[in-house]
Amino acid sequence: MSSDPCSFSCVTRCVTRHLNLTLRVDFDRRVIRAKVELTVEALEDRFSALTLDTKDLQVVSVTANGQAASFTMGPKHSFKGTPLDITLPFDLSRGQHVIVEVTYETSPSASALQWLSPEQTAGRKQPYLFSQCQAHHCRSMIPCQDSPCVKHTYYAQVSVPKDLVTVMSAVRDGQEVDPQDNNRVLYRFRQTVPMPSYLMAIAVGALESREIGPRSRVWSEKEFVDKAAFEFSETEAMLKAAEDLVGPYVWGRYDILVLPPSFPYGGMENPCLTYATPTLLAGDKSLSNVIAHEISHSWTGNLVTNKTWEHFWLNEGHTVYLERMIGRSLVSEQFRQFKAMGGWKDLQDSVNTFGANNVLTNLVPSLQDVDPDEAFSSVPYEKGFALLYHLEELMGGPEVFMGFVRSYIQMFAYGSVTTDEWKNHLFSYFKDQVDILNKVDWNAWMFTPGMPPVKPQYDTTLADACISLSQRWVKAKDQDLSSFKESDVKTLSSHQLIEFLSLLLQEDPISLTRVKKMQEVYNLNAIMNSEIRFRWLRLCVRSRWEEAVPMALKMATEQGRMKYTRPLFREIFNYEKYRDEAVRVFVAHRAAMHPVTSGLVAKDLQVDASKTTSL
């Protein structure tokens, strides 16, 4: 196994096969008191020492097969945390198992966990806890081999106050009153499919659920649960479409948890329990591609996993490819083409943000001494998709290429994979067309920063209306402004309105007069669909419309999805007159933000991480 630059754990010498977790969630102290038993298999003879990843954990004791084991904590690294070095009281030979038990407590500042006070929830009565382990935060919740090249099953029992409900990335296995404290409830969970540590997930809160399909429930606070059940009612149709494309769904349940607004991502593909941002509850189902994306991860990502985060594009590029194939099955090929064009624009945005020479825009970047959170962008998603789409065109179209995707999933299911292994499989699958594959400029695609060497020719049918309307606004003279009418946008779908605004964001800022006219005729301020609103507010701030600044700051702080929060803050920060205001609002809201979000926004706004007082 190649070594993982983001982990201290000794993945070449031993591998974790199973975790048995006992967790006690303490909301008063904002810690989890815990015990984990790791079933570890030795990969070499005379095996007697191992290293686990930890971050801000207080380790109380370690045993091996019930005997005390000595341990030391190494020096703390800025983002990798602290290695936990364990010496076993005996030797193992290759293939033998040992049960290593670690008793420990998490820190209130654990980067995997966000603790919300009752005031930060919809119900305002009960506290809430949720985890987000991807990419390298599981180690702040569980001492483990925190690398995606290691996969294990798990069992968990979780004790929480009796008014709260617990869900995990596993199948529920019953609940009972906590025998140690009758004010608490014990929830049990079982995950029988081996999975990487970054998919460990727990959420605790005043949760309710509604059935939305034969294998699916949606979970959220009661204030959102009916809205969520409506929004995600197509889940089973998407699961079936995915199974038709890539084979049976192996995880049993597919539940969805709608999180509080501070959740930093659109969705997270935790097995059996996809996490979803509440910004999806737009009321028009136009944002269902997030669920199509998370469903697709059940195969690409969860079943076949990148071996290290340098190969993240294998997770995300294939998942975007499958997500758009689901769109093709359920809507049309034109719709897939339209979404692919939008993705190319998102890639352009990321390349512009990082800079065209930044090695983090490589499809396969080096992450030696790089924090994966800081490398996160659209690049692995959209450059990855563009490569797969380019190969689809070369090899004979979607049906032919889906044959390869299915074969890749079958070949590497339950394992972890590198770009080289993927590429070797591609060449052996298409062994009769190797001459075509050899013409691909692999070095330019994989290891060169900036935009890809080839731009695919997408079908523009659904985009033409967006392109022509955006061009009318760009070219309009002041005397032409009266020609714009409300009817211009009435025939556009939400997807097309998003595209129209994205096109304008790629142009030089339009004049303040035009933005005000656009509001007058289209009343975009009234649209609450978050994808539309976020682009519209960026456009307004960029054109220096002062009235939009408070609206943009409100959107940046009342939800915490980084896709919206970071660009909105950056846009206001770049408006010289309101730069200090952006910093002031961030500092005032920082304590309520998710730790990953606040860390990255602080970097964007050049705020010193230690400066917590208001300016």
Image (cartoon, helix red, strand yellow):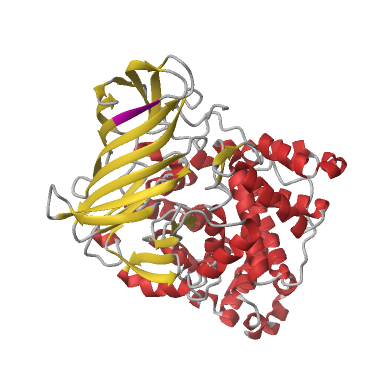
Give coordinates of residue 415: x percent, y percent.
56, 39
Residue 360 lies, in percent from the top left, at: 61, 39
Residue 131: say if magenta.
Answer: no
Q: Seen in the image, is 198 located left or right of residue 338?
A: left
In the rendered image, which quarter is residue 436 located in? top right
Considering depth in this image, is 252 or 329 the residue closer to the camera? 252
* Magenta highlight range: 97-101
* Quadrant of the drawing holding the N terminus: top right
What residue is at 22 percent from the left and 61 percent from the top? 126
- Residue 426 vs residue 107: left or right? right
> In the rendered image, which quarter is residue 536 located in?
bottom right
> Is residue 188 depicted above or below 434 in this figure?
below
- Determine whether, in the image, residue 377 is placed left or right of residue 383: left
204 or 582: nearer the viewer: 204
Q: Is residue 379 visible?
A: no
Quarter of the image where one finds residue 520: bottom right
Q: From this viewpoint, which residue is outermost toward the right?
A: 435
Residue 99 is inside the magenta segment = yes
Residue 139's spot in the image, x, y percent? 38, 36
